[in-house]
Image (spheres, rainbow, N blue to C red):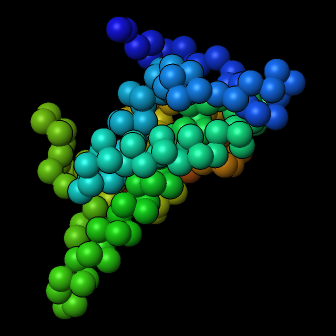
């Protein structure tokens, strides 16, 4: 079975639509299939200490429960699903930090970056963790998941201009953190 990665899934039938047909689990699986690769990429980026499959699975469970809330007029299905992944990744990070504090009350929370993927610049990974949370999300969505700015805005729940500004500020901060003062 091949899974398309470029196209967005067709609109979802919800119990509130005129057809009155509830979505089956199989139809839901087909509907989310084109979004699975970006969901997994974002989960790996936002919760490197957690198992990305677990974060995606939790997000899919949440999406199934809230499937009637999806509104195609407000954005693409992929953007809606990625927003849920971002929420689940934040929850996984908080749970991980709470677990560490239970184990050792004197321990400092870990740095967010875990072992980078092969070929990834360790300095860049470290610098990204030095960004504000909103900047990190924008960088992960745009540069690592590959979403266009419009879709990043949908996932982040803000305007396109805000995403552009956030990415600009993040790039400027990364240049400072990486020691690249040349403004090319």
Q: Is residue 136 visible?
A: no
Residue 20: image quadrant is top right
Question: Image point 24% across, 56% down: which residue?
Answer: 49
- The quarter of the picture where the N terminus appears is top left
Relative vertical location of residue 48 with respect to residue 5 in this rendering, above or below: below
Q: Quadrant of the C terminus?
A: top left
Q: On the rendered structure, is 106 left or right of 38?
A: left
Q: Residue at x 37, y 48 (%)?
A: 55
Residue 27 placement, left or right of 53:
right
Task: Where is residue 178? Give x, y as percent.
Answer: 27, 53
Horizontal side, residue 130 vs residue 105: left or right: right
Regarding residue 116, the answer to whether it shows in the image is: yes
Quarter location, residue 16: top right
Which is nearer the eye, 151 or 5?
5
Residue 110, compared with residue 125, is above or below; it is below
In this view, the residue farthest toward the right is 18
Please report the residue visible at 45 percent of the width from the left and 54 percent of the height from the top.
88
């Amino acid at each position: 079975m091949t899974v398309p990665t470029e196209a967005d899934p067709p609109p979802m039938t919800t119990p509130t639509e005129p057809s009155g047909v509830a979505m089956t689990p199989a139809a839901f699986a087909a509907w989310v299939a084109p979004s699975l690769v970006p969901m997994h990429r974002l989960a790996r980026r936002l919760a490197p200490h957690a198992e990305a499959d677990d974060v995606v699975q939790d997000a899919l469970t949440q999406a199934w429960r809230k499937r009637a809330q999806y509104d195609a007029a407000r954005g693409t299905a992929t953007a809606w699903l990625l927003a849920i992944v971002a929420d689940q990744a934040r929850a996984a990070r908080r749970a991980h930090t709470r677990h560490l504090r239970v184990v050792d009350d004197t321990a400092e929370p870990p740095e967010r970056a875990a072992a980078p993927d092969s070929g990834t610049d360790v300095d860049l990974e470290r610098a990204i963790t030095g960004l504000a949370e909103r900047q990190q999300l924008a960088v992960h969505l745009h540069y690592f998941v590959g979403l266009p700015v419009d879709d990043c805005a949908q996932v982040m729940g803000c305007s396109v201009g805000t995403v552009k500004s956030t990415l600009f500020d993040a790039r400027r901060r990364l240049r400072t953190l990486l020691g690249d003062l040349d403004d090319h």
